[in-house]
Image (cartoon, grey):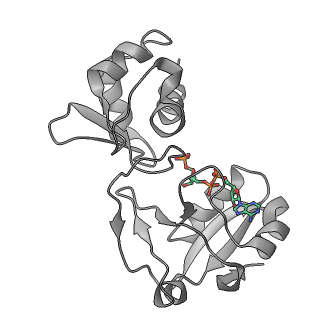
């Protein structure tokens, strides 16, 4: 089992389906590290040094330990309703959303909706957005007029791993990049 596979399983548990191993997340998305390791071990091998390695080397810095190291949570990307104490901030003038060509028509119509996640995910640069878009097929990049949205009263949050989040991007704030 590669570290990447184990990391994907951790994402599934910490963001979407803790019940798969009977794990409890608190209201802030934290799981007990010892309990997580014990429960994951029923499905695949995991020890504390390996978990620490995954958290430290994760390419998107998806996870954080609490200051005392006893708890762990995903920094963003949840579908279950937890409050990860996101920083509410003024966004840059423009943010980017990477998606697939095949979603473009629906996005032009409805704007960006959060689907199963708690927020719409936005990137601060085109490269990152392109990588996100490639996960779903031929990438398509939308520019989001986040400065205008903020001026109009929309809230923006930034996760500790640098992902910008907002609840909905109405179509009027989208521009296309061809
Ligand atoms: C699309 C990954 C049709 C949206 C990434 C996206 C990110 C619409 C898909 C994070 C739509 C949802 C999140 C509309 C939005 N009509 N399709 N009106 N509005 N969509 O995976 O943003 O590797 O839930 O464009 O890097 O792709 O998991 O969201 O294509 O940061 O850590 O609906 O997940 O990070 O897909 O990705 P997702 P996302 P991790």
Which quarter of the image is occupied by the C terminus? bottom right
Rendering coords of residue 35 (x, y %): 31, 19
Q: Tell which of 157 and 9 is nearer to you.
A: 157
**Residue drawn at 45 percent across, 45 percent down:** 59
**In this picture, residue 141 sits left or right of residue 59:** right
Residue 112, above or below 90: above
Tell me if residue 124 can be seen. yes
Residue 113, above or below 64: below
Rendering coords of residue 21 (x, y %): 48, 18
Tell me if residue 2 can be seen. no
Residue 56, above or below 141: above
**Residue drawn at 49 percent across, 40 percent down:** 15
Rendering coords of residue 160 (x, y %): 34, 57
Rendering coords of residue 80 (x, y %): 51, 43
- Quadrant of ligand 1 in image: bottom right
Give the mark count: 0
**Residue drawn at 49 percent across, 36 percent down:** 11
**In this picture, residue 37 sits left or right of residue 135:** left
């Amino acid at each position: 089992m590669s570290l990447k596979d184990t990391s994907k399983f951790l994402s599934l548990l910490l963001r979407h389906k803790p019940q798969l191993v009977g794990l409890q997340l608190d209201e802030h998305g934290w799981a007990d590290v010892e309990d997580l390791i014990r429960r994951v071990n029923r499905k695949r091998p995991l020890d504390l040094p390996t978990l620490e390695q995954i958290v430290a080397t994760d390419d998107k810095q998806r996870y954080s330990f609490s200051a005392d190291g006893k708890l762990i949570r995903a920094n963003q990307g949840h579908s279950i309703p937890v409050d990860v104490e996101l920083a509410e901030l003024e966004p840059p003038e423009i943010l980017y959303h990477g998606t697939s060509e095949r979603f473009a028509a629906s996005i032009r119509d409805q704007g960006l909706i959060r689907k199963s996640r708690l927020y719409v995910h936005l990137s601060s640069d085109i490269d990152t957005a392109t990588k996100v878009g490639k996960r779903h097929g031929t990438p398509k990049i939308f520019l989001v007029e986040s400065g205008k949205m903020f001026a109009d009263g929309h809230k923006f949050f930034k996760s500790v791993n640098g992902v910008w989040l907002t609840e909905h991007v109405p179509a009027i704030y989208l521009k296309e990049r061809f």
